[in-house]
Each structure stands twice: as C-alpha cells, then as structure tokens.
Amino acid sequence: GDTDGRVPVTSTRYSLNKMQLKEKAAWRAWFHNHQVAGWTVEYEGLTFATLRGAGHQAPVYVPQQALSLLTHFLSASTLPSSRF
C-alpha cells in the first residue's frame, strides 16, 4: 500500500529508477468501482502498482482493491486507467 512503512513507495520508486528500466506507460492512477484505487507505472517486464490508503498488509486495509489488483495480475491484464 501507499502508506506502507515497511516497504515505502518512495524507496521502491527510487530503486526502480536506479534499475534504468525502459518505461512503457507513465505513472498514473488506476481505478476500482469508479474510485482511484492506487497508482501504477509499467516498465518492460515489470509493473509497479500501489494500493491507495493501504499499509503493509494491504488486503486488511482495502480488500476489494487488493482483490482487483491480484485478479488483474493473475490474468496479465492492464489495470483500469479510467473511472468509467
């Protein structure tokens, strides 16, 4: 989650930038049920996504959004970038 104190988003983004991966899709919001569920950026071979308002154990904080993220991951589909 984006409020995770153990694995902070800022540190992860810093590490990803240091890896110099080629970016396929810029940092953007992703949506679940017409609400911002988090943010994501896509690189070649890797997608980084956050869950808005969630801590280290994300499903406890935002279960529906966490399930949506997992479902998209398992089906290898892109996270929705529109409310509608």
Image: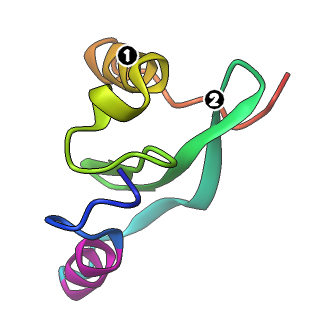
Residue with the mark numbered 2? 80
Q: How crowded is mark 2: few (under 14 residues within 10 Å), some or many (20 or more)?
A: some
- Looking at the image, which residue is at 29% across and 28% down? 60
Please provide percent x and percent y for residue 24.
48, 57
| Extent of the magenta region | 10-18
Is the C terminus in the top left, top right, bottom left or bottom right quadrant?
Answer: top right
Point out the residue furthest to the front here. 60
Q: Quadrant of residue 13?
A: bottom left
In depth, the one of 20 and 16 nearer the eye is 16
Where residue 34 sits, quadrant-wise, is: top right
Q: Residue at x 38, y 61 (%)?
A: 3
Magenta stretch mostly in which secondary structure? helix
Which percent across, then down, holds residue 69? 40, 26
Amino acid type at circle 1 is Leu
Q: How far apart are marks 1 and 2 (CA)?
A: 14 Å
How many residues crowd around disc 1 within 10 Å: few (fewer than 14), some, or many (20 or more)? few
Position of 6 with respect to 23 (left or right) is: left
Taking the image as shown, residue 34 lies to the left or right of residue 30, namely right
On the image, the x and y values in percent for residue 25 come to: 55, 56
Q: Which tag is nearer the camera, tag 1 or tag 2?
A: 1
Q: In terms of secondary structure, where does tag 2 sit?
A: loop
Q: In this view, does 16 lie above or below 68?
A: below
Q: Name the residue under label 1.
A: 67
Residue 55 image offset from top left, x and y in percent? 30, 50
From this view, report whether residue 23 is shown above or below residue 57: below
